[in-house]
Amino acid sequence: MKTGMVNVDNLSTKEQGYTQAVDLLKSGEVVAFPTETVYGLGAVATDEAAVRKIFGAKGRPQDNPLIVHIGEVAELEAFTTNISSLAYVCIDAFWPGPLTLVLPLKEFSLAKNVTAGLDTVGVRIPEHPVALELLKRLKQPVAAPSANKSGKPSPTKAIHVWDDLNGKIPFIVDGGTTGIGLESTVLDFTTDIPTILRPGGVTKEMLEKVIGQVNESKFTDDVKAPRAPGMKYAHYAPNAPVYLIESSIEVVKNAVADIHKEHKKVALIASEQFGQTAADYFFSLGKENQLEDAAALLFDALRNCDGTDADIVLAPVFTKQDVGSAIMNRLEKAADGNYYE
Ligand code: TXA
Ligand code: MG
């Protein structure tokens, strides 16, 4: 399959880009498009055959449900029921935005492969002009996981989608670099106390200010039936193994020296202050303590490791406060929990 890519930030190709994307979606095809978090790979959420193509292109396990994207709150009614008033408080406060709500699914309203057979559905209104324009023109809910090959870091640039899915999907809407850089927070509203299943741009601290107590699932992979099924799979991994390491310049310098003694090369993914540690490759996550910047740069940095001949990737840990919780969740997955000692 030939993969087309059109930039919709460019006035001369904008109209063509949207028209082509909408026509393809309506005809049962998949299309990649930017959101404020990461690029998504979308299909019309009521079209089972189209949704099947998403799983095929990504190599995604069938038991991992997809997030449904809508352009307006009014569209919720068609496929959810019994939405609590607390959920509506969240909707008012955070939509459009990087918050996915898991809500009770209205039976037979969506293709069943969207929800992997669950009786709940994850849904959000994205806060990206391109995603919103697409949804507004299409006027149908769009099921869209991140537009990466399954297991790879999510795409924050159109070129990342191209690298992973060229030849496997018909079209990429290029809308530049995504802003937040980590996937949305997934908040389960089908438990007594709302539970964060995946940390993201909307933090526990932000949620608790608006709706009071929020639980955090442990985000571990060893549970038999994780509430967010996607959390049990290997994720975000470059080809070389990733190790977390204490956030100390001294400790990192020593680790790099040790690795060099074994005639191995090391890539370092860290804030700027780690730039002088003699690693063979350094991918900056921005200024120290700027968590939003680190979030925005993380997936690109992980992907850049694959363009090197590094044998090992080191990543100093971040605080788990605020967006640090989402950053560490992704890093721990990329490292499969491994620490460099
Ligand atoms: O920011 C995002 O959320 C991006 C953009 C494209 O919107 N999408 C995204 O989708 O990250 P994906 O498929 O890569 O991650 C969806 C996560 C998975 O961990 C999945 O298991 C969980 O959400 N999820 C989806 N529906 C669910 C449901 N009904 N119950 C529990 N977890 C659900
Ligand atoms: Mg994903």
Image: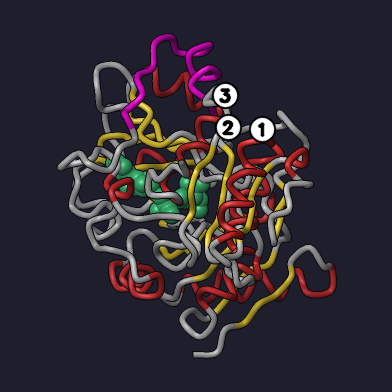
The region drawn magenta spans 202-218
Task: Kindly identify the residue that appears in the image at 36 percent across and 24 percent down.
Answer: 216
Q: Is residue 8 above or below residue 298?
A: below
Using residue 148 as the reference point, say whether residue 36 is left or right of it: right
The kind of secondary structure element at disc 1 is: helix
Please say if the residues under marks 3 and 1 sit with CB atoms less than 8 Å apart: yes
Point out the tag, 3 or 1, that comes first from the N-terminus: 1
For residue 215, above or below residue 186: above
Which of the 4 image quarters holds residue 137?
Answer: bottom right
Amino acid under label 1?
A: Leu
For the residue marked with disc 3, what is the amino acid?
Asp
Mark 1–mark 2 CB contact (< 8 Å): yes
Looking at the image, can residue 115 be seen?
yes
Q: Which residue is mark 2?
A: 318
Q: Report which residue position mark 1 lands on.
A: 291
Does dot 3 land on a helix, a strand or a loop?
loop
Q: Residue at x 77, y 38 (%)?
A: 273
